[in-house]
Image (cartoon, rainbow, N blue to C red):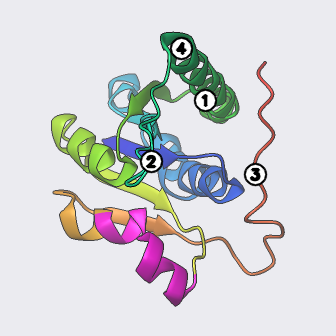
Amino acid sequence: MKVMIALDESKGSLYALNWVLSNILKPIITTTTAAEEQKEVLVYLVHVNLPFQTYVYPAGPVVYTTTSVLESVKQAQDKISAGIFARALKSCEEMKIKTEALAMRGEPKEVICQLAEQKHVDLLVVGSRGLGMLKRAFLGSVSDYCTHHAHCPVLIVKPPKEFTNMHEQVPQTTA
C-alpha cells in the first residue's frame, strides 16, 4: 500500500499525519504477520514550497531579484521543509514504516496531484485547514482541488473542534 500525505506548516497537517498513522496504517501493520507484507507499506511525505515570485508593477518599475536573494529564499524554504520532515519522520520511524520525504516547488495543489499520479499511490491524505466558505472561495482549497483532480482516493482529515490553535504555525526548529 502506498500512501501520500501532504504536509505544510500548520498543526492540522501534522494532525492528519498522526491520524492516518494510528487509524489506518497501524491496524494494517499489526494485523499483517509476514515481514514482506509490512515492507509493502510505503508513505510519501510531501511538502510543496511556492516558487518565489518577483512582482511587476503595472504603472511603475519592474522589480528584479538578485541571485543572492533567490538563494536565501530557497535556503529558508529548505530549512522549513527540513523542520516539517524531522517531526513527521520521527512519527513514522516510531511505527517502523518505510517513508520517503519529497520537498517540491510549485503550486501545491497541482504538484500534489501530479506527484500522486506519478507515484501511483493508493491513497492521498490532506489535512483540512478549516477555511470558511468565503476564504475558500477566494483563496481556493488544496483539499478541494485534490478531491476533484487526483486520480486516486483522497482522504481529508479534519481536526476535531477541541483541537486548539489549529491555525497557529508549527515551530520551525530542526533536529
Quadrant of the rendered structure where residue 94 is? top right
Could you tell me which quadrant the C terminus lies in? top right
Label 1, on which residue?
85
Query: Which percent across, then down, holds residue 27?
Result: 51, 52
Question: In the picture shown, does residue 68 fall above or below 145?
Answer: above
Question: In the picture shown, does residue 12 fall above or below 26?
Answer: below
Where disc 2 sits, the SS reads loop
Q: Which residues are magenta?
A: 132-145
> Badge 1, how many Cα within 10 Å: few under 14, some, many 20+?
many
Query: Which percent across, then down, holds residue 85?
Result: 60, 29
In terms of secondary structure, what is the magenta stretch mainly?
Answer: helix
Label 4, on which residue?
71
Label 3, on which residue?
169
Residue at 40% over, 44% down: 56
> Badge 3, how many Cα within 10 Å: few under 14, some, many 20+?
few
Residue placed most toward the observer, 44 or 133? 133
